[in-house]
Image: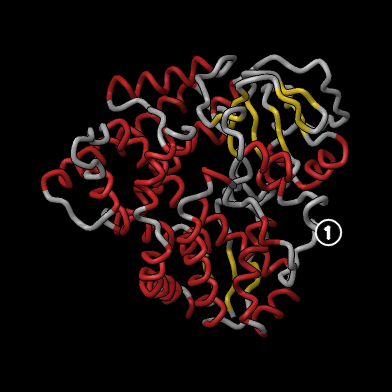
Amino acid sequence: MTVEETAHEGSSSSDHKCPVTTSFMDHKIQSEPWEFIAELHESCPVHRVSETGVWLMVNYEASKEALLTPEIFSSTVRAASGHQAEKLRLHQEILSKEGWGHVLTLQRTDPPVHTHYRKLINRVFTPRRVAAMAPNIDAVANSLIDAFVDSGECEFVNEFAIPLPGIIITEQLGLDRSQIHTFKKWADAMLAPSMRLLSEDEVREVAEIELEAQRHFAQEFEKRRQNPSDDLISALVHSHEEGEEPLTIAELQNLMHQLITGGFETTTSALAHGIWLLIEYPETQKMLRSNPELLENFIEEALRFWSPVQGLARMTTEDTEVCGTTIPSGSMVSVRYGAANRDPEQFKNPEEFDITRKDNGGHLAFGFGAHFCPGASLARQELKSSFTALLQRSEWFEFAKPLSDPAHEPSFFLLPLEEMHIKIK
C-alpha cells in the first residue's frame, strides 16, 4: 500500500455492506492480520477501509484477475486526494526542488510502458546469471554466520537478514558493500511514506534522507557514463540502443528507488520469518533437518504463510464488480497477496504451516502477471543459500528472548521486523 492509498478518500459503493468492524489501521491488526483476513474471506472478500477509502481485495482468484487486467486495475496510481495529500505534495516538492521528483517507471506503470522498463531489468536478473551468483551468495551467507556461530546467539535481523540481501544487491548495482547500512537507511526512508501516515516533520526528514541517496546515485550514474563496468547501474545508464534516448536521471533515480527498496526489505523479511517459523514449529524444524530435500518446499510454504509483501496498490479505471461488490472508478485497491495466500478456497487448511503441502506452488508472494517480481529467482537463491548454510552449521534454533508485541513495525503493505534474538545450538 502506498501513501496514495492511505491518503485517498474516494467515493464509496452504495452496495458495499460488510459486517467486519475491525480496523485495518490498528497496528496489531497489520502485524498479525490473520483473524481479520479470515473474517474477510468468510464475509466480505472486498472490503473498504472506512478511514482511508482504500479497498482491500483478499480473494485469491479475484486478486489474480485484477493483476491480469491492468486496463481496469492500473498500476499507474495517480496523485492522492484527501487529508494526506498536502504532505505527499510536500514530499514531492522537496525532492523536485532539491533533487529529482518521482516519475513513473517499472512497478508504477502499465504495459506497454512497463514492458520497456521490464526488459532492462530482465537482462540482469536472468536464471543463468543468478545460477552463476550462487557460489558467491553461499560464501556471503557463511561469512555472516562465521561472525556469530561460536557465540551461540545473534540478533538475526541485523546480523544476517539485512546484510545478506543488502550485500548481494549492492554488489550487483556496483556499489560499495561496506556501506550497506547507509543503503538500508536510504531504503527505509524511501519506504516510509508507503509504510504509515507521517507527520510533516517526518515527511521532511525522510525526504532529506532520500535526497542524500539521490545525490550519491547521480554521481554513480555519471561515473558509469564515463567508465562503464559490469554492473546494474552501468546496464541501466547504457541501456538505450542506437537511435534511442537514454534514460533520464529522474527515470534512473526511480529505478534505483525500486531496486534498493526491493533488494533489502523483502528478502530480509522472508529470511527472518523463515527462522521464526522453524522456531514456532519445532516439529517442522526437526523434519527439515532430517529431510533437507524438503528445503525448497519449506521456502515456498514460508513465502505463502508470511508473504513479505502483503499487498500492493492498483487504481480502478472504471466501475467494476468484484465478488459481488461494485468498486467505483478511480478507487484505490490494495491487492492483498498475503491474504490471497490464506484463501481457503485455494489452499486447503491455509492457517496450517505444512512443508509437505502440495498446493503451495501457486502462491502470490511474488505477485502475478506482467508485474511478477523480476528478482524472484535471486530471492529464492538467497533463501536457499541462507537456510542451507544456517541448517548445516547448527543443531537447533530457538528464541533468545520473546519477540516484541506487536512483532512488526507499522506498515500498510510490508511485515518489517525490527529485531529477533535467537539462540543457535
Residue that appears at 45% across and 24% down: 201
Quadrant for the C terminus, please: bottom right
x and y percentages locating residue 155 in the rendered image? 52, 63
* Looking at the image, residue 260 lies above or below residue 73: below
Q: Which residue is mark 1?
A: 349
* Looking at the image, residue 401 lies above or below residue 211: below
Q: Would you identify the image quadrant in which residue 128 lies?
A: bottom left
Quadrant for the N terminus, please: top right
Residue in the foreground of this view, choosing between 78 and 202? 78
Q: Is residue 317 left or right of residue 393?
A: right
The amino acid on which the numbered mark 1 sits, given as a three-letter code, is Asn
Residue in the foreground of this view, choosing between 51 and 230? 230
* Looking at the image, residue 314 lies above or below residue 83: below
x and y percentages locating residue 137 in the rendered image? 40, 69
Q: Tell me, yes or no, if residue 189 can be seen here.
A: no
Residue that appears at 59% across and 26% down: 315
